[in-house]
Image: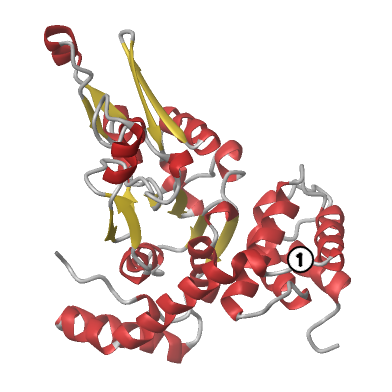
C-alpha cells in the first residue's frame, strides 16, 4: 500500500484545506467542490485526507460499515444482528464494533452503473432463491467520502443517480423484480478544471462549499512545493514520518471539534448577518444561509471557539456562497469578487 502525501505537508491552498477539514468535522455541510488549474494538489489533498481522519467504529462483518452506536441507521442485516431470524437480545449482543479507517473512495469517470450502485446476481436468485448482492462504490463510501476527479465530465445518468442517493441517504438497487437497499451517506468531494466544462446546476447546488484552486504566484511558495514533492518521491515513508506529529495534531483537532460542535452557539446576530449577506447577493433558496451557518459553526469548533462570530462568517462566506450566485449581465465581476464586495459592505474591511 502506497504512503499518501501528508495533509499537513501540503503547501498553500488554505481555502481548500479548510473546506475539507470543515466537511470532516460536520458532514451535514454538504461536501466540497474544488475547481481550478491542473497540477495544483487537488487530488493529493483529498487522498491525504484518508490517513488524516480519526478512525471510526463499524459493526464487525458489516459490508456497509454501519455504526453500532446508531441503531436507526443500521442496514437490514445489522438490524437482525447479522443473522436472519435472530432474536432481539441476540442481535444486540452481536453488534460488536471495531475501528477502521474512514473510507475515501474514488469514483472513476468510466465506472459502470453496477460498479457504482452494486450488482444483483439474478441467476443465483432464480436458481437458489437467494438475494445475492455485490456492494458497489456507494456502499464502500458509506460514512466516509466519495471523491470524483473531473466531476464536470461525469456522465449524466451517474449524476442523476448521485443526486437521488445524496438526497435520500439510501441506495436502492432494483433488477427484474428484486430489490436491495442499504444506507449510503457520504461526503461528496469533486474536483475539476472549469476550462473543460461546467457542472450541472443540480449537482453544483449539492456541494456545500466551493473553493477556487489557483497556481501559486509567489516564488518561494512554488519552490517549497517542488522541494517537498521531490523529498516525498525520494522516500515516501521517511517524509510521512517527518510530518506524522503535525498530522496527529490535526487529527486531534478534528476529533475535538466534532465533540465540541453541538455546543457551539449561533447567536441571532450571526443568523441575521448570514441572511443579510445572502439577500444582498441574491442567492436562490435558503441553502446558502443553512450551509454558511453550519460551516461557520464547524469552523468555530475547529478554532476552539464557543460562539459563531463575524470572523467565522466572513472566512466561510466565499466558499459557501460563490457557486450559488445568479448570473448578473450588468456586473461582469466574477462570483468571488461579488462575494468579497458584499462581505466588505456588510462586515466592513479588515483594516476597519
Quick check: 36 left or right of 80? right
Q: Is residue 108 visible?
A: no
Colour style of the rendered protein structure: secondary structure
- Return the x and y of residue 111 as percentages of the image width and height: 28, 36
Between 7 and 111, the one lying in front of the other is: 7
Please name whichever residue, 30 or 57, is drawn nearer the observer in this view of the structure. Answer: 57
**With 92 as the anchor, is 203 left or right in this view?**
right
Question: Residue 124 in the image: x percent, y percent?
Answer: 14, 15
Residue 340 appears in view: yes
Who's the residue at 52% across and 55% down the image?
27
Question: Would you name the residue on which mark 1 appears?
Answer: 266
On screen, residue 212 above or below 236: above
Residue 11 x %, y %: 42, 81
The residue at 21%/44% (across/down) is 61
Q: Quadrant of residue 206?
A: top right
Query: In the picture shown, does residue 219 fall above or below 269?
Result: below
Q: Nearer the viewer, residue 323 or 51?
A: 51
Q: Is residue 235 left or right of residue 111?
A: left
Quarter-wise, where is residue 272 in the image?
A: bottom right
* Left or right: 84 in relation to 292: left
Neighbourhood count class around disc 1 (C-alpha, 10 Å): few under 14, some 14–19, many 20 upward: some
Where the N terminus falls, by quadrant?
bottom left
Residue at the farthest bottom position: 220
Relative height, residue 235 to residue 30 (above, below): below
Query: Where's the C terminus, which quadrant?
Result: bottom right
Amino acid at each position: 500500500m502506497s504512503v499518501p502525501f501528508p495533509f499537513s505537508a501540503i503547501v498553500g491552498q488554505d481555502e481548500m484545506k479548510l473546506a475539507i477539514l470543515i466537511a470532516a468535522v460536520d458532514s451535514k455541510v454538504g461536501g466540497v467542490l474544488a475547481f481550478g488549474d491542473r497540477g495544483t494538489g487537488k487530488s493529493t489533498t483529498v487522498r491525504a485526507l484518508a490517513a488524516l481522519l480519526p478512525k471510526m467504529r463499524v459493526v464487525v462483518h458489516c459490508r456497509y460499515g454501519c455504526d453500532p452506536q446508531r441503531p436507526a441507521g443500521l442496514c437490514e442485516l445489522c438490524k437482525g444482528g447479522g443473522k436472519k431470524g435472530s432474536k432481539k437480545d441476540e442481535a444486540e449482543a452481536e453488534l460488536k464494533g471495531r475501528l477502521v479507517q474512514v473510507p475515501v473512495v474514488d469514483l472513476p469517470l468510466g465506472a459502470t452503473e453496477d460498479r457504482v450502485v452494486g450488482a444483483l446476481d439474478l441467476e443465483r436468485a432464480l436458481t437458489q432463491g437467494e438475494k445475492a448482492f455485490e456492494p458497489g462504490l456507494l456502499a464502500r463510501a458509506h460514512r466516509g467520502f466519495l471523491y470524483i476527479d473531473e466531476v464536470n465530465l461525469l456522465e449524466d445518468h451517474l449524476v442523476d443517480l448521485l443526486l437521488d442517493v445524496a438526497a435520500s441517504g439510501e441506495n436502492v438497487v432494483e433488477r427484474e423484480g428484486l430489490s436491495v437497499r442499504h444506507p449510503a451517506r457520504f461526503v461528496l468531494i469533486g474536483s475539476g478544471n472549469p476550462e473543460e466544462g461546467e457542472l450541472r446546476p443540480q449537482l453544483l447546488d449539492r456541494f456545500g462549499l466551493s473553493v477556487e484552486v489557483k497556481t501559486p504566484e509567489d516564488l518561494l511558495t512554488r519552490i517549497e512545493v517542488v522541494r517537498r514533492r521531490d523529498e516525498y518521491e525520494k522516500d515516501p515513508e521517511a517524509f510521512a514520518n517527518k510530518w506524522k506529529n503535525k498530522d496527529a495534531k490535526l487529527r486531534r483537532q478534528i476529533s475535538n471539534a466534532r465533540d465540541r460542535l453541538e455546543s457551539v452557539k449561533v447567536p441571532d446576530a450571526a443568523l441575521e448577518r448570514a441572511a443579510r449577506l445572502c439577500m444582498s447577493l441574491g442567492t436562490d433558496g435558503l441553502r446558502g444561509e443553512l450551509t454558511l451557518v453550519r460551516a461557520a459553526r464547524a469552523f468555530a469548533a475547529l478554532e476552539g471557539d464557543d460562539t459563531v462570530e463575524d470572523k467565522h462568517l466572513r472566512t466561510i462566506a466565499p466558499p459557501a456562497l460563490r457557486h450559488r450566485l445568479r448570473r448578473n449581465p450588468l456586473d461582469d465581476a466574477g462570483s468571488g469578487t461579488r462575494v468579497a464586495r458584499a462581505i466588505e459592505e456588510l462586515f466592513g474591511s479588515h483594516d476597519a
